[in-house]
Image (cartoon, rainbow, N blue to C red):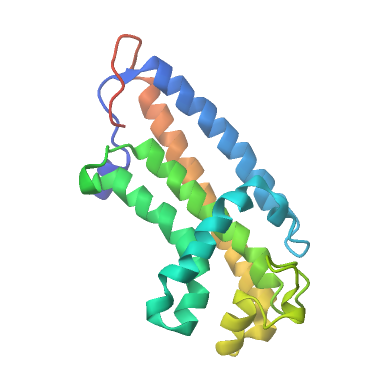
Amino acid sequence: MLSARLLYVPDRVASFGYYGRCAAYAFLFVWGWRLYAMDLGGADIMNSFMHLIVLPIHEAGHLLFIPFGRFMSILGGSLLQVLLPLVLMASFVFGFGGSRRDNFAASVMLWWAAVSIIDLAPYIWDAFDPKLMLLGGKTGAESDGHDWQNILGDLGMIKRAHLVAGIAHALGLALMLGANAWGAALLYLQFHRRDSNAPEEDG
């Protein structure tokens, strides 16, 4: 069953690794809520360290999706910054490509996908009245338009940019809550299997 796979932990869990995961969980829990609480319209998240992490992935997405046409190339930046952590999550859960199974690492990847969506929300919000400074040093209003101006413009939804941004922000929160709950459940299960003499195992 999928639930059994998602909640799998090894019979013996190294104590050192367990407490390291607890520290990582606490850090990401607090950081995620700080990112979510940032002003959506003010795009404060664009000045965060998390944005610096996802920005090169976003830009790589434009190049990756060029073969699929103009629309997908523009959308590809946003897609890749969300899809990459989800692919990594699946690899940790199912052990694709010989990767090490680690459900806690998978929950962190889900957290990353969630905050990547939260990171996109101000960008979407800005599409209706572009004020964000882009990498080229201009706003969307001063250039040919940024990604989400073009995406929503092509879809005839530019006037609904704030609604779409609000949905993205809420979706990011829902996924972050799911990641937090998943990680907490795994730590609870691992707590009862701590062993100071155990080697670090998949989990």
* Horizontal arrangement in the rendering, residue 181 relative to residue 14 (left or right): right
Q: Between residues 196 and 88, which one lies in front from this camera angle?
A: 88
Q: Quadrant of residue 122?
A: bottom right
Q: Is residue 137 above or below residue 159?
A: above
Q: Between residues 181 and 119, which one lies in front from this camera angle?
A: 119
Q: Which image quarter is the C terminus in?
A: top left
Q: Residue at x 76, y 80 (%)?
A: 141
Counting from the top left corner in percent of width and height, residue 50 is at 61, 48
Q: Is residue 174 visible?
A: no
> Which residue is the extreme one toward the front?
136
Instruction: Report the number of numbered marks.
Output: 0
Q: Is residue 148 above or below residue 7?
A: below
Counting from the top left corner in percent of width and height, residue 12 is at 27, 19
Q: Residue at x 36, y 28 (%)?
A: 189
Q: Is residue 70 above or below residue 45?
A: below
> Which residue is the extreme one toward the top?
197
